Image (tube, grey):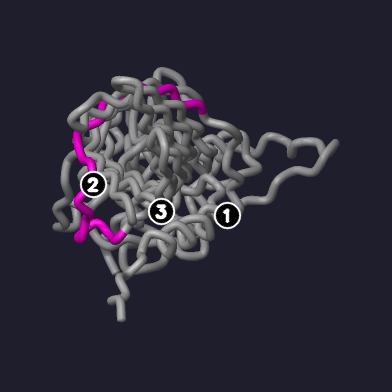
Amino acid sequence: MPRLRPRIEPLLLIAAVSQLSAQGGGGGGGGGRDVDLRLGRWYSGNQSKSYELRTDAPIAGIFSQGLAAQILIHDSLGRHHAFYGAGWQLHAFRRRSTVSPYALAGVSLGVSTDTSSQELAALWTLGGGVEWRPIRWAALGLETVYRLQDVGPRGFWRTSANARDGIAASIGLSVTIGRAVDRRWPRRGPGELPPPQAPPPQPPLMIIGNASGVVKTALDALGTPYVWGGTAANGFDCSGLVQWAYSQHGIRLPRMSRDQAHAGAEVPPLLDALQPGDILLFAAQPGGGVTHVGMYVGEQKFIHSSNSGVKLSRLDGLDTDGAWWVTRWVGVRRIVQ
């Protein structure tokens, strides 16, 4: 009786398709879905031309995922070899900054064809790349990956004698289509007039919580000028203000905003979850890496040092200034429990 061998690729593909239907370009109000077109070469003993069309959308934190359609073609001495397939890819660190290195892994199922035969095959991919995003909705990228094509297929760890592997390199163009809806905030209906401009936010009447002293110290700095690299009362930058306020109460924090983004405990970026003293994390591009920080003070307001100096802003999607910050709010860290 023949021995049954595991078939894991169909299960992975089914799981990927089911997850893709839930993609909405998440990432805390980030951009929409990317569509990538890639052209390249696969060096697997012989050179194969590669053509790839894939999608990519954020799912959580540093990760994004999407579907990929791939064609690999090699013609030599009158023989035509090709792979036609589709599958799933997982990316990490994509769309984090203007120039963004990233990692990827994926699996595809398809058909491997020769001049006179066709066989079921799996294509495994592991590698990374770097993309340059001069504008938010478009990017150019270079990618280098290791690929293994197994005819059968029997699984990555039990390849057949006819398996092919090698290094592939490609260039690509990525275009962002659509924009994610941030479901934390109400949206105006068709024809509905925008609300009148709200007056400048004022400090909360009452500050509660274990970090109330830190918040009051930060509020004492309202109106202080912005100074790049500033960490004292004569001037602050964004992370300098947060570090200074906590240091006055004996709590040491990292100096840079990207390091403060890993301090303390992670809290969901939801209004109902916030407590005064929480560090709010913002990105220059929706869904990107942390470039700005502020401190939540209560009543849907936060204090931060921007180009105009230390001021209060609202976390309000219906407020003109607040809506700008809402779309760039990517995380929360709690220092005092």
Categorize mark 2 by other alpha carbons within 10 Å: few (<14), some (14-19), many (20+).
Answer: some
Q: Which residue is at the far bottom?
A: 1
Q: Pinpoint residue 231: horizontal percent, then vertical percent.
A: 19, 35
Labels 2, 1: front one: 2
Residue highlighted by disc 1: 21
Estimate the x, y position of residue 282 in percent, counting from the top left: 39, 41
Q: Is residue 20 left or right of residue 198?
A: left
> Mark number for residue 163?
2
What's the mark number on residue 60? 3
Q: Secondary structure at mark 2?
A: loop
Q: CA distance from mark 3 to mark 1?
A: 15 Å
Instruction: Give whichever of discs 3 and 2 has the lower sequence position.
Output: 3
Q: Is residue 278 above or below residue 127?
A: below
Given residues 256 and 155, the one toward you in this image is 155
- Binning the other alpha carbons within 10 Å of mark 3 as few (below 14), some (14 to 19) or many (20 upward) gives some
How far from the left and from the top, in percent, is residue 309? 37, 29
Q: How many marks?
A: 3
Residue extent of the magenta highlight: 154-175
Q: Is residue 206 above or below residue 55?
A: below
Amino acid on which disc 2 is placed: Ala
Q: Amino acid at mark 3?
A: Ala
Relative to 187, residue 130 above or below: above
Considering the numbered disc 3 on the image, is that residue within a helix, a strand or a loop? strand
- Between circles 3 and 1, the one closer to the viewer is 1
